[in-house]
Image: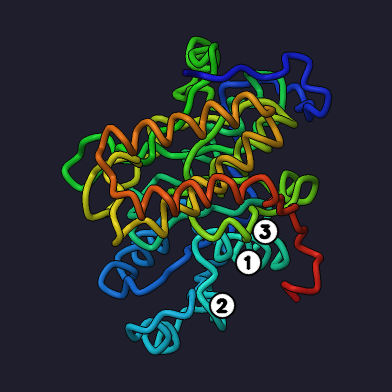
Amino acid sequence: MAESFDEKRPETRPVPIVTNPQVASVQGRVAAVIVTYNRLAKLPKTLETVLAQSYGCDWVVVVNNNSTDGTREYLEGLDNPKLEILHLDENLGGAGGFEHGMARGYNLGADYVWIMDDDCYPEAEALEILLRERDLSSQSLGYDVPFACSLVKFIDGSLCEMNNPITTWDWPRAYLDGRKSLLITECTFVSVLVPRWAIEEHGLPLGEYFIWFDDKEYTKRLTRHYGPGIIALDSLVVHDMGVNAGVNYRMIDESNVWKFEKGARNQASYRLRNEGRIPYALYYRRILREMREGEVSKPVRKRMRRALNEARKFNPQPRFPDNPLYQ
């Protein structure tokens, strides 16, 4: 179900009126942020497509999450002045990787950070379109759009099931004003553009999440304070993930429960603190119901219940790029 937002938007950032709102001057320094862990077979193609953008990045920050497959050696062998390599001493998960990578991009002086996984292949104009559509949509909507994401395809050209953003109740508003974009409240970190001011004012993703829902929490946080982001329909990327499937709690087993535990804890914590006890309880019940329907084993269900209960005490807070942790 699509979500609404506060129509008053008390923290909405006004945008200056331009003479011709249909023309955008694409400008600004961009730091791409790629988080990688043991994907040496795919990372080179991601780097190749990012470095070949029609609107060139000023920096490409690669966060190596303590990979063990030769990624460090590969990255250290590259000779490109745009590359900023950040080797972490431990695997902090996607959430920790994006937290550190976005902080590095901000501290380099980027006006925008453009974030993605190590198996994301943006088409040549993906970044340029994100910049242009965010600017033009801001002019159309009358507030500074806090984030813009690409349309994510699977390797066969179909919609990537895991990366489908959530639209607002009035999702066609910018589209009907001539924009190639739709209003969204949340999206995943597979080609997302975030302006510097959003990071400065509301911080970084929650690294303590480790994996899953860090992207949803962050974009929902920005929507809550500024108004919706957009999906730029002509900004296209391919997500080269193994299987084109979304999260399904009916299919948890011993091999993947560790990811589902983190996701359930994170989302339950978010619901409890931002939506209230009833949404938390309804989410809790839905997870238990879906696991029963999928005949998930009792030991796995026990671990999931423990994660859902842990959410009651799990309450990480955003950090900001000036934190000594990132210096």
The answer to whether residue 32 of the structure is visible from this angle is no
Marked residue nearer the N-terminal end (2 or 1): 2
Which residue is the site of mark 2? 86
Q: CA distance from mark 3 to mark 2?
A: 16 Å
Toward the viewer: 251 or 137? 251
Q: Secondary structure at mark 1?
A: helix
> Disc 3 residue type?
Ala
Residue placed at 41% from the left, 36% from the top? 288
Instruction: List the single residue furthest toward the front.
Output: 298
Residue for point 43% across, 48% down: 190
Residue 249 coordinates in the image, percent (x, y): 35, 40
How far from the left and from the top, in percent, is residue 211? 49, 57
Label placed on residue 100? 1
Label 3 CA crowd tier, 10 Å (few <14, some 14–19, many 20+): many
Q: CA distance from mark 2 to mark 1?
A: 9 Å
* Above or below, comparing residue 95 to residue 158 in the picture: below
Disc 3 versus disc 1: nearer the observer: 1
Please say if 299 is above or below 23.
below
Q: Is residue 156 left or right of residue 60?
A: left
Considering the numbered disc 2 on the image, is that residue within a helix, a strand or a loop?
A: strand
Residue 269 placement (x, y as % from top left): 63, 43
Q: Which mark, residue 223? A: none
Answer few, some or many: residues within 10 Å of disc 1's Cα (few below 14, many 20 plus, some between 14 and 19).
Answer: many
Report the residue marked by disc 3: 110
The crowd level at tag 2 (other Cα within 10 Å; few <14, some 14-19, many 20+) is some
The residue drawn where x is 70% and y is 30% is 224
Question: Between residues 77 and 117, which one lies in front from this camera angle?
Answer: 117
CA gap, disc 3 and disc 1: 14 Å
Whichever of labels 3 and 2 marks the residue nearer the N terminus, that label is 2
CB under 8 Å between callouts 2 and 1?
yes
Q: Earlier in the sequence, mark 3 or mark 1?
A: 1
Q: Secondary structure at mark 3?
A: loop
